[in-house]
Image (spheres, rainbow, N blue to C red):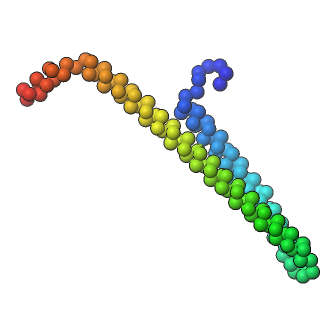
Amino acid sequence: MMFGKKETPKQMAKKASREIKRETRRIDRDLTKDFERDEKRVMQELKKEAQKNGNSDKVKRLAKQLVKIRGAKGKVETMKGHMETVATDIKIQASSLVMAETVGKATKVMTKVNKRVDVQKVMKNMQQI
């Protein structure tokens, strides 16, 4: 933000989490649209060429291409998993920050209470009861 208030860590975490979710959805779309389409196309070509029984070089090339497609698909799925892990870590850090702020506020309140309460009077009253 250029003007106005500075973003709080909670807002920054929320924004980062939203962006990661957006990218994860984009990766899912790309994965299903591109990789699966290519994989089906290569599988069909592979089956067609294998039935011809005369073009083993092309079958080998298509098989290698299929392996590469599946490997790339696996790498993208792994990357997606890492992104989801980062999103979870961001949420955990934001929660920890909120807890730390809450503990800090409670400490301030307890300090003020301790200043106002006379401990000797409280001890005396407790002994009387």
Q: Is residue 90 left or right of residue 67?
A: left
Q: Quadrant of residue 104?
A: top left
**Residue at screen point 13% across, 25% down:** 123
Residue 55 pos. (x, y %): 92, 77
Q: Is residue 98 left or right of residue 69?
A: left
Q: Is residue 74 above or below residue 84?
A: below
Q: Is residue 90 visible?
A: yes
Q: Is residue 40 visible?
A: no
**Residue at screen point 79% across, 67% down:** 66
Q: Quadrant of residue 53?
A: bottom right
Q: Is residue 8 above or below residue 81?
A: above
Residue 118 pos. (x, y %): 19, 19
Residue 115 pos. (x, y %): 27, 18
Foreground residue among 57 and 85 = 57
Residue 114 pos. (x, y %): 26, 22
The quadrant of the image that shows the N terminus is top right
**Residue at screen point 46% across, 34% down:** 98
**Residue at screen point 90% across, 72% down:** 58
Q: Is residue 6 left or right of residue 102?
A: right
